[in-house]
Image (cartoon, rainbow, N blue to C red):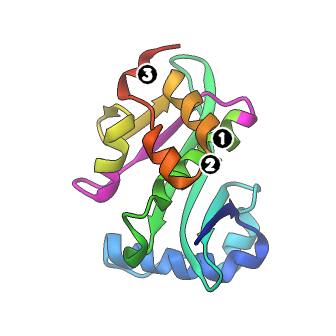
Amino acid sequence: MHLIREATREDATAVAALLQAYMLESYEQAWQGSIDQVLEDGFGARFRMLVAADARQALGFLAWEKAYDLHHCLHGGQVLDLYVLRRYRARGIAVQLIARAAEAIHREGGAFLKGGALEGGAATRLYGRFAPAFGNDYILGGKAFRHLAAQARLPLRSLARSMPRREWNFEP
């Protein structure tokens, strides 16, 4: 069993390990950051982060920052990175992380969540199920965003069964 929660300063070492694994897997290079920099910039200073963890370790994360859509004069959030350790994938953790980020952004008055995906990666398939693509960017907005934000605390099976329809992104 895992828990999705806002990352705290005490998670910095675990977050650094996840970032290292993410960079190696996705870009075949070492993470160039530092725990000190995450402590300085994270936890609301420049970005926020959710972590998925079980009793033993951190399993994944979603980091986001505030964003603004000038075309529609709306504020929301932009996913910086989303990662789940390979052995914990296909268990709904990424969906739960996205839903909880949408919930936090919506609670603060935001209206969308934008995320990019590496070409042909798992995130492309995941985002594509409920958000339209604009180039490499996927934007969850409108009714779909509000629906997912409202469902964020459901048990995993219920959340998976209640994912928003892509066309809801175009409904106010």
Q: Residue furthest left?
A: 120
* Residue nearest the observer in this picture, 68 or 79: 79
Q: How many marks?
A: 3
Q: Which residue bears the numbered disc 2?
A: 100
* Residue nearest the observer in this picture, 74 or 94: 94
Determine the residue positioned at 51% across, 45% down.
159
Q: Secondary structure at mark 3?
A: helix
- Is any atom of residue 87 visible in this view? yes
Q: Residue furthest top?
A: 172
Determine the residue positioned at 36% across, 28% down.
166
**Height in image: 40 above or below 165?**
below
Label 3 neighbourhood size at 10 Å, few (<14), some (14-19), many (20+)? some
Q: Which residue bears the numbered disc 3?
A: 168
* Residue nearest the observer in this picture, 96 or 138: 96
77 with respect to 37 (left or right): left
Q: Whole-percent x and y of residue 25? A: 34, 76
Q: Whole-percent x and y of residue 18? A: 52, 77
Real-space Cα separation, disc 2 to disc 1, in angstroms: 5 Å
* Residue nearest the observer in this picture, 77 or 153: 153
Q: Which residue type does callout 2 highlight?
A: Arg
**Height in image: 163 above or below 29?**
above
Q: Is residue 120 magenta?
A: yes
Q: Which residue bears the numbered disc 1?
A: 103
Real-space Cα separation, disc 1 to disc 3, in angstroms: 17 Å
Q: Secondary structure at mark 2?
A: helix
Query: Do the residues under discs 2 and 1 have CB atoms within 8 angstroms?
Result: yes
